[in-house]
Image: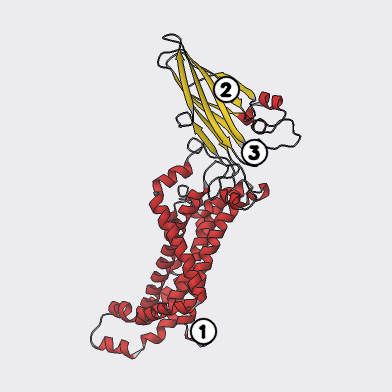
């Protein structure tokens, strides 16, 4: 163990290891932030939710980072509620059962591009007689565009892009025509203060109307959004703790159990070692990925079930033969004979004298094994066999593949999880290779 501590201290002399440790530290910080800022239950609820929760989020929007690039000023999402300070609301009651309510929602538009869509969400309070509402759109240059009139239910949504009559009147897509400069052939947005005017008629004393205006942007969030309006930041954040937990637990579980079994076989020898070697050779011909696909299809796609199967299949891996070759010379070492002479038991010798002797050598293998299990989890998710509850990097890639993200130009949808997977593999690989040079005598001489 002293050699292990000394070797770890030598990592500071390897620039590649320092860079790798920086990558790993960043991933750990990201994982801790996800766990603290967004508890798992909330993350699952948000990721599995429909458009009811994400109705204020644009669909297939690029990351807002694009606007940081000089010259870019894509439209961002603007939400205006009737309860906002800038909004105005007045009610004139003409009788006990009849009243007129006027609501005005201002919207400051300062972008160089048009919004992706505009929606008006209306909520009404009534018992029997439903309120009636008329919507109008006022532009910065003084024009007033009538939108629609409708009798309201408890909840109603007016989708501007779906209003064909309005599109015919404006001569272009409705959500573009509302922001377009008049008398110009090219589609150029008119910047300034817009206003949504809602005039409601109430037919009951306790009746009321509430309005929310949403101008959906072309960019949204740090990671963009998907086809279900979900913010991809949720999956990218929670993908870090899931990936690290799966990779580390699988690598530790399979490596340590393999080492213990190899040490037991070496020490007891004879039929014990023979059985272990035959099981290892049998397990070597089993196809891991097809077995996981079979289990995920017929039994369960839970990440914990998959983790248990991965560890079980890794117990009798070919690593047993590698560790056996390392432990055979140690078995006949003088200090082992001394331990037997003063009466040390078999398992004390295995766990106290055999296994610690080779731990420094297997540490590099353990570190480099972690990203392979991370990629395995992402592969299962990409094949549609990921955990149905957890938001992970593989699930993001699966959705992107199913929706044809690359063909539609939504490159951010693939680049986000792909870069995080690449940094994970690169970070652990750089640290593992440096550790290999430190603990492997042959490489150290080079």
Q: Mark 1 highlights which residue? A: 443
Image quarter of the C terminus? bottom right
Q: Considering only order in the chain, which callout, 1 or 2, is on the residue closer to the N terminus?
A: 2
Percent x, y of residue 311:
43, 63
Q: Position of residue 388 (x, y in %)?
A: 47, 47
How packed is label 3: few (under 14 Cα within 10 Å), some, or many (20 or more)?
many
Disc number lying in front (2 or 1): 2
Q: How many angstroms separate mark 3 from mark 2 (CA)?
A: 21 Å
Question: What secondary structure is found at the residue carrying circle 2?
Answer: strand
**In the depicted view, which residue is nearer to us: 39 or 122?**
122
User: How far is mark 1 from mark 3, CA to CA?
Assistant: 60 Å
Q: Residue furthest top?
A: 95
- Residue under label 3, please give it: 114
Q: Earlier in the sequence, mark 3 or mark 2?
A: 3
Q: Quadrant of the N terminus?
A: bottom left
Labels 3 & 2 near each other (Cβ < 8 A): no
User: In the drawing, does residue 265 fall left or right of residue 55?
Assistant: left
Q: Position of residue 8 (x, y in %)?
A: 41, 77
Q: Looking at the image, is mark 1 or mark 3 nearer the viewer?
A: 3
Work out whether residue 217 can be spotted: yes
Label of residue 46 in the image: none
What residue does disc 2 label? 135
């Amino acid at each position: 163990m002293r050699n292990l501590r000394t070797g770890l201290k030598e990592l500071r002399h390897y620039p590649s290891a320092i860079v790798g440790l920086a990558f790993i530290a960043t991933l750990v910080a990201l994982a801790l932030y996800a766990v603290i800022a967004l508890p798992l239950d909330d993350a699952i609820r948000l990721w599995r939710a429909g458009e009811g929760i994400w109705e204020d989020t644009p669909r297939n929007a690029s990351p807002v980072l694009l606007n940081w690039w000089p010259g870019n000023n894509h439209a961002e999402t603007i939400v205006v509620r009737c309860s906002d300070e800038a909004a105005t609301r007045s009610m004139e009651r003409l009788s006990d059962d009849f009243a007129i309510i006027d609501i005005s929602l201002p919207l400051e538009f300062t972008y160089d591009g048009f919004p992706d869509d505009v929606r008006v969400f209306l909520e009404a309070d009534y018992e029997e007689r439903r309120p009636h509402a008329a919507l109008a759109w006022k532009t910065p240059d003084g024009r007033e565009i009538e939108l629609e009139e409708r009798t309201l239910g408890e909840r109603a949504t007016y989708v501007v892009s779906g209003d064909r009559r309005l599109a015919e009147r404006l001569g272009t897509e409705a959500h573009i025509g509302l922001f377009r400069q008049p008398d110009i052939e090219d589609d150029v947005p008119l910047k300034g203060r817009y206003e949504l005017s809602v005039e409601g008629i109430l037919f009951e004393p306790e009746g009321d109307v509430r309005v929310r205006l949403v101008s959906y942007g072309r960019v949204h969030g740090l990671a963009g959004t998907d086809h279900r309006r979900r913010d991809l930041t949720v999956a990218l954040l929670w993908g870090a703790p899931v990936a690290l937990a799966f990779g580390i637990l699988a690598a530790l579980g399979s490596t340590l159990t393999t080492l213990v079994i190899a040490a037991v076989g070496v020490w007891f020898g004879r039929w014990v070692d023979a059985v272990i070697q035959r099981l290892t050779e049998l397990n070597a011909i089993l196809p891991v990925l097809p077995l996981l696909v079979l289990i995920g299809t017929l039994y369960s796609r839970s990440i914990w079930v998959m983790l248990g199967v991965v560890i079980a299949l890794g117990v009798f891996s070919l690593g047993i033969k590698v560790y056996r070759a390392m432990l055979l010379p140690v078995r006949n070492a003088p200090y082992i004979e001394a331990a037997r002479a003063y009466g040390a038991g078999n398992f004390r010798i295995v766990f106290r004298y055999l296994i610690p002797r080779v731990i420094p050598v297997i540490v590099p293998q353990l570190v480099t094994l972690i990203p392979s299990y991370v990629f395995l989890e992402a592969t299962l998710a990409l094949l549609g066999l990921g955990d149905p509850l957890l938001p992970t990097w593989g699930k993001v890639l699966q959705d992107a593949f199913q929706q044809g993200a690359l063909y539609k130009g939504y490159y951010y949808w693939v680049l986000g999880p792909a870069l995080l997977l690449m940094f994970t593999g690169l970070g652990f690989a750089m640290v593992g290779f440096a550790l290999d040079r430190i603990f492997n005598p042959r490489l150290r001489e080079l």
